[in-house]
Amino acid sequence: MSKALKEKRSFAETLVAWQQAHGRHHLPWQNTQDPYRVWLSEIMLQQTQVSTVLGYFEKFLQHFPTVADLAAASQDKVMGLWSGLGYYSRARNLHQCAKDVVTRFDGKFPSTAAELITLPGIGRSTAAAVASFCFSERVAIMDGNVKRVLTRVWAYAADLSVSQNEKALWQLAENALPTRQLTTAMPRYSQALMDLGATICLPRKPNCQACPVKNECKALAQAEPEKFPVKTRKIKRTSEVLWLLLAQNSKGEVWLEKRPSSGIWASLYSLPVFESEASLRTVFETNSKTSPMRSIKSQATGQLEVSVLPAFKHVLTHKDLHCHVVKVRLKQKPKTPQTGAWWSENNWQALGLPTPIRHLLSNSL
């Protein structure tokens, strides 16, 4: 047996032992081999903190105890329960994935990463997590925490924004997997990497002295763990201006439309969205020749009671939304391009709404 192989096995075995003694064991999706619960947690935890996910995870299981229950639900109910968790494409893929599990796999999640990755919303790391946790398959996970742990341990300085460098890291991770007693070792090893990245090997000020593999960590030996991982390509941010119509009728109901299946806030319910103030004003019947903003601010006759609310900025992952809001009291439905309906507060509270729209309604009605 080569010295390199012994070191790789030592690394894996050290992490397995550490996880058993010091890792996290209290989370509701742990200590189970139910692929439905593991998959649900993995999707929810993508770019989302554990503390935020806990309530949503419990709520989803209350409404959808099984993957068949989730598959049978309406999209509106799924999006409504997801509302506030963000990254809504996850919810759409979650729903479609549940349907595919029922139709393609007779309601049972496949047991291999190769099959799991064919399902909507399941990437390579998520497929590996489900396969290793639930079926003890020898496959490597590679979420953000794991990348940080592994690049520091090995002082892997290649730029991960280059795809071939990330593929090379995947290969190193595969080589480092446990090779014995996989039934118990694989779930513990995968969990150990997650726990280490979440609790000790932090992005800033890692607690290196508490790390079980500190003696093997080349980044620590170089006294610069925060140098890793290396990723130079920065996300190019854009911005967009939106005009939102907050229309109410005499009952206090608000006019909402379901957004298209692609683009910003896809498949969610929202206030009508316009690209400009001028296009928003086309929903009103007015012959005013004064400036558009002045006309809106002063207009309070006939069927219209109009006011302009303070503008606000909403920050998405890649884009800043600069939102202007025009509040209108109408006696009839607005002439918006999309199909919509009046919703009472009791009803719109249960809808899938973008976070800024929910906040706006909660604070402005």
Image: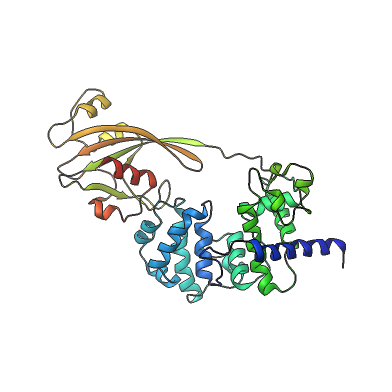
Foreground pick, 116 / 327: 327
Q: How many marks?
A: 0
Residue 105 image point, x, y percent: 51, 74
On the rendered image, what quadrant is the C terminus found in? top left
On the rendered image, what quadrant is the N terminus found in? bottom right
Quarter-of-image position of residue 68 = bottom left
User: Residue at point 36% right, 54% down?
Assistant: 352
- Residue lying farthest left? 302
Foreground pick, 316 / 51: 51
Residue 11 image point, x, y percent: 76, 61
Residue 97 image point, x, y percent: 48, 65
Q: Is residue 32 left or right of residue 168?
A: left
Q: Is residue 359 visible?
A: yes
Please tell me whether residue 203 is drawn above or below residue 22 in the rendered image.
above
Please tell me whether residue 285 is drawn above or below residue 153 in the rendered image.
above
Q: Is residue 20 left or right of residue 305?
A: right
Q: Is residue 18 left or right of residue 344?
A: right
Foreground pick, 116 / 18: 18
- Residue lying farthest top? 290
- Residue lying farthest bottom? 106
Residue 45 image point, x, y percent: 52, 56
Q: Is residue 272 visible?
A: no
In this figure, which colouring scheme has been used for the structure? rainbow
User: Residue at point 24% right, 32% down?
Assistant: 307
Please tell me whether residue 124 is drawn above or below residue 111 in the rendered image.
above
Quarter-of-image position of residue 171 = bottom right
Please tell me whether residue 326 is drawn above or below residue 158 in the rendered image.
above
User: Residue at point 38% right, 58% down?
Assistant: 81
User: Residue at point 35% right, 32% down?
Assistant: 311
